[in-house]
Image (cartoon, rainbow, N blue to C red):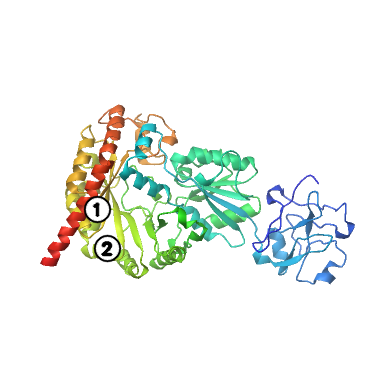
Amino acid sequence: MDWIPFGVCSRRHSRPVLSRRGLAWWLCLVASTNDSTWSHCAFWYWLLEPGVRVDIPNAWDKLGSDYAVFAVYSWGCDNACRLLYERVEIVLQTHLLCPGSFSNSGYCSVPLEDAVNMRIGLIAMSGIRVCDGELLRLGLTLPGFVERSKTIASLPSLGLLTLAGLTPPNHDVQYIEMPDLPQGENIPGDFDLVAISSYSAQIDEAYELARRCRRKGIPVLMGGPHVTVLPNEALQFCDAVVIGEGEPCWPEVLQDAERFALKQRYGSRKSNYDLADSPVPAFELLDISKYNRLTVQTSRGCPHQCEFCASSVILTDRYKQKPVSNVLAEIDRILAIWKHPFIEFADDNSLVARAYWKELLKHFKAKGIRWFAETDISVAEDEDLLDLMRDSGCAQVLIGLESPVEAGLHKLELRNDWKLKQFSHYRDAIATIQSHGITVNGCFVIGLDGHTPDIFDQVFSFVRTAELYEVQITVMTPFPGTPLYARLENEGRLLEPRNWKKCTLFDINFRPAGMSVEQLHDRFKKLVVELYSEEFTNWRRHTFKESLRQRRQKGASS
């Protein structure tokens, strides 16, 4: 016997089985050399006629019409694996036989719906990446920087969990974080398909992982923002790619994988996928002890089109909202595995659809959750919404302020200068939001075209005078597929085109307009030390608590 045919195991039974990856396009008859009584059956891959050839004498008389026996001789022993493939499942009645020992006829029946067709590994390229060794060392010691980094690094891949939720139960799905994989060539699990999701900074690691899987004969599918904009690059390392949203094409991917007929490309950024059809993510696959928060998505896309944005706007060209009932079902699934969860809403811009969020938040108070969301400064305009946010467990909102000076905001967006028009309200809006007991994490992008070497002091001064509870600074990053990347490439300002390892938000890969690369590099590190020092971090948090206490005292006395 010089090849191994496709074998599967049942969730209910743990007998050893043969891998399905050895199946070519058909199966041939393999006769037993040591037991003529139990000779083996086989069938063609493209079997069209009903029935399966079984050459066990009087098998149908013994077993009845609801059962079929088909076996493959197992290498070096007298055990066989049951065999199942798409066309065969159609022609069988209700049950098939689980393999046992030929000598004692130890067969047991298993319903067809319990059969596992494929073992699927969903691998997330999680964790923070930073190329600058000195900045990385600073990040490991500065309290404020460490906390946010740990939060980001511990978020599971919502996209992969969503695909797991779409996967029929006859497939065995395993969710794996990249840091949990063994080094070297070993891949855990005998997978029939591996799907890898990655951002640009981790893409080289993802390609290497794909190489390891394919070396073991495992078909590899890749997706995510980077693969969406550079599918031809990805196809050099994997068998198939998903472009855009994964849900619309995942059923087709599974069907093709079962037939060993993966296409090279699936999906499109022009998908009309309705988020009402989105399944509840398979949160139950997670080891919940590893995470300090879980993610839920209420929308995709963003009303604003910032030049540098590489979030879900890469995956879809339109703004979509998920029905309230779907979101609540996902939260209930989380509550089933985590009594008092902290939820991060994984939207590019939550809370912009105010009527929608007011309806959604009415259901939160009774659920006992705490939550975090990314939004824009306009949320401060609606006091009723802020009250609902506070009462429903909102702990913090992250707001992309982008720049503490107007010059950096000019032409930041492709459609209009919305953030520039809001700039004069920044400080008042932050005060309004934080007066409701909701902390603000203000985000700044350093190195925008309007920035000069003064920007570093301007950021620190703004954070202090606005009394921001939390702050996040990043370096302007030209992600592939963004208008920013195209513009800088056209202007000859990219330092290392296609060096995706530097797409970390902390490494410099462009020539700034208003300062030198060296100034941006050195002063950014200095600003990191100033903003995230223990002293200033404690001052920011103490100031927020004291201001909130004073406001509450004033309100009680009036």
Image location of residue 335, percent across then percent down = 43, 65
Give the position of the C terminus as an image quadrant: bottom left
Q: Can residue 27 be seen in this view?
A: yes
Residue 80 placement: quadrant: bottom right
Residue at x 28% of width, y 63% of height: 389
* Residue 68, numbered circle: none
Residue 132 in view here: no
Please report whichever mark, 1 or 2, sits nearer to the chain's N-terminal start.
1
Residue at numbered disc 2: 390
- In this view, the residue in front, 240 or 58, is 58
Residue at 41% from the left image edge and 56% from the top image edge: 295
* Residue at disc 1, secondary structure: helix
Q: Residue 377 carries which label?
A: 1
Q: Residue at x 50, y 60 (%)?
A: 282
In this picture, is 58 found above or below 450?
below
Please indicate whether residue 65 sits to the left or right of residue 528 in the image.
right
Left or right: residue 537 versus residue 152 is: left
Q: Among all residues in the image, which is located at the extreme right?
A: 36
**Residue 340's x, y, as percent?**
39, 63
Total marks shown come to 2
The Cα atoms of the two marked residues, 1 and 2, are separated by 16 Å
Q: Which amino acid does label 1 sit on?
A: Ile
Residue 291, given in percent of the width and then of the height, sits at 43, 54
Q: Residues within 10 Å of mark 2 (few under 14, many from 20)?
A: some
Of 208 and 308, nearer the camera is 208
Whether tag 1 and tag 2 are in contact, CB under 8 A, the answer is no
> Which circle, 1 or 2, is nearer the viewer?
2
